[in-house]
Amino acid sequence: MTGHQTHIVIAGGGTAGWMAAALLSSFGQRGYRVTLVESEEIGTVGVGEATIPQINLYNQALGIDEDEFVRATQATYKLGIEFVDWSHLGSRYMHAFGDIGRDIGIVPFQHYWHRARQLGVADELGHYSLNEIAARDGRMQRGPLKTTDVVPAMPYAFHFDAMLYAAYLRRFAEERGVERIEGKIADVPLDGESGDVIALVLDDGRSIGGDLFIDCSGFRGLLIEGALATGYDDWSNYLPANRAMAVPCASGGAPNPYTRSTARMAGWQWRIPLQHRIGNGYVFCDAFTTHDEVRETLLANLDGEAQAEPRLLRFVTGRRRKCWNRNVVALGLASGFMEPLESTSIHLIQAGLSRLIKMLPEGRIPTAVIDEYNRQTALEYESIRDFLVLHYKATTRDDTPFWRHCAAMPIPDSLAHKIELFREAGHIFRTSDDLFTEVGWLQVLVGQGIEPAAHHPLADSVEPGDLASYMETWESLMRREAKQMPTHTQFLHSHGAAQTA
Ligand SMILES: Cc1cc2nc3c(=O)[nH]c(=O)nc-3n(C[C@H](O)[C@H](O)[C@H](O)COP(=O)(O)OP(=O)(O)OC[C@H]3O[C@@H](n4cnc5c(N)ncnc54)[C@H](O)[C@@H]3O)c2cc1C
């Protein structure tokens, strides 16, 4: 290649657009030019507030200072997600990040835990998770543990204000040479021969030509669907929720270092504590309730005064048939959407970006590259879908038509196999496409009330007394570590509380 600079044009400046711009600006200076087009008038979705620990990899790739980021985005720390009333009314469990107990040789901890439960010498699963113990106790620390070197460090993610995050990334990207163009995209012309997108044409007639286009235009999918008619796989048969009503409220005290998801009559309600407010929303299926009912439930279950009118968002769960089509890569809501039950959307943006950067073309885009990108993306989407469906399917709730529908609905074969394997033999195997670890699956399988019929025979070879003291040792090591941690509020004050908090 001689002197040609590949021009990457990003359509849209929500979380996806600015995450793409910031990462490309820090990686792609040589040989790449990045332009982002957004319309303030159209605005962003801006409700993505909870993340998973992989966000740290993205922030580290940018070289962001964590305390500065926490301050700029009014962030709090997140150690996991608590699920209330999901398995049955009155139930409560946590999907905490990080490990649980410790495997013995090649046999995973869950088999020993299962046997210990049968013998009556083990507590609930969460007692062997440092993240859960610390989360329930309202504590936070990062880095190596202070009292033990046999328990792995505590992974964490963040809750943050998505608008502030996008603004933060915008500053970062613009300082590194990304050009931002304000304007409304009115037309996306295609090359008559190749079918590739040639340019974004704005409503004032300006035309922004490019080589590679990243569609971050949100649910509209202006390029991937509007121009290229790629097609969409609708997964509402597995994940029936199709609306959310969101409202921020005043904080009601010290922020919990975890997200809460409470099952409701026709869906579930999120509670995401930030430094300056709490984000709340009710995700529901409109075939089983009314907007008025949802609004009433949402407003009746806030910790503090509502800070705005509840906002309704409509979505269709599923994914674009190809997230990379011709010279367009769709990221964020333009690529598909799965409800925020396990906070995976921002992660999917990040995963798509890192895949794109690994495969970044120069000049002609080989079909094999596009196919591989789409193959990997499809598998990742499907593995997340299965994990989300598990929460709904494995319920014993039958108190409303919505929950009866969920318990009876068909599920993907891939998930049916996973459930069967655990139910029959206590096994969980993670494939390379699985975002969630065995321990993540374990917590939700057990939390949703699925009991394995058996455990690995090697778990029977440990003497009951030894097993009891093994369980006791892990629990006390973790409790001792959690006890010396600062509270989450103290930690925030010393590591990035915003001025206004
Ligand atoms: C109810 C709900 C809750 C969520 N909660 C979470 C969560 O807790 N965690 C998580 O990880 N994710 C969550 N998400 C997902 C998260 O909000 C999105 O993944 C994220 O905000 C990315 O959005 P986006 O940038 O793709 O789209 P948007 O925010 O919609 O941005 C689209 C951009 O395109 C621009 N645009 C559109 N049309 C045009 C045009 N014609 N001309 C010019 N510009 C245009 C807009 O102006 C905007 O800048 C949630 C989503 C929903 C709906």
Image (cartoon, rainbow, N blue to C red):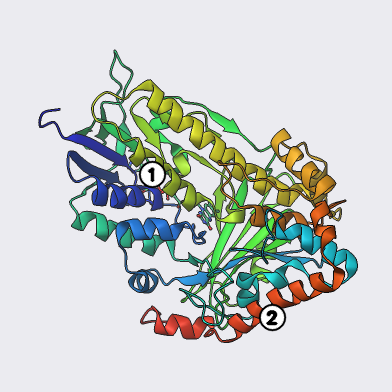
| Quarter of the rendering containing residue 328 | top left
Q: Quadrant of the N terminus?
A: top left
Residue 204 placement (x, y as % from top left): 22, 37
Picture quarter with the C terminus: bottom left
Q: Residues within 10 Å of mark 2 (few under 14, many from 20)?
A: few
- Res 463 quadrant in image: bottom right
Q: Nearer the viewer, residue 225 or 458?
A: 458
Q: Secondary structure at mark 1?
A: helix
Dot 1, crowdedness within 10 Å: few (<14), some or many (≥20)? Answer: many
Q: Is residue 173 left or right of residue 407?
A: left
Q: Nearer the viewer, mark 2 or mark 1?
A: 2
Q: CA distance from mark 2 to mark 1?
A: 41 Å
The reply, left or right, for residue 340 in relation to residue 113 is: left
In-image side of 467 versus 165 (left or right)? right
Q: Which residue is denoted by mark 1 in the rendering?
A: 353
Q: Nearer the viewer, residue 383 or 333?
A: 383
Q: Is residue 384 found left or right of 290 in the rendered image?
A: left
Q: Horizontal and vertical percent for residue 386?
A: 66, 43
**Which mark identifies residue 476?**
2
Element at badge 2?
A: helix
| Residue nearest the observer in this picture, 243 or 464 | 464
Residue 374, numbered circle: none
Identified at 64% across, 54% down, the residue is 283
Q: Is residue 383 visible?
A: yes
Q: Tag 2: residue type?
A: Ser
First in sequence: mark 2 vs mark 1: 1
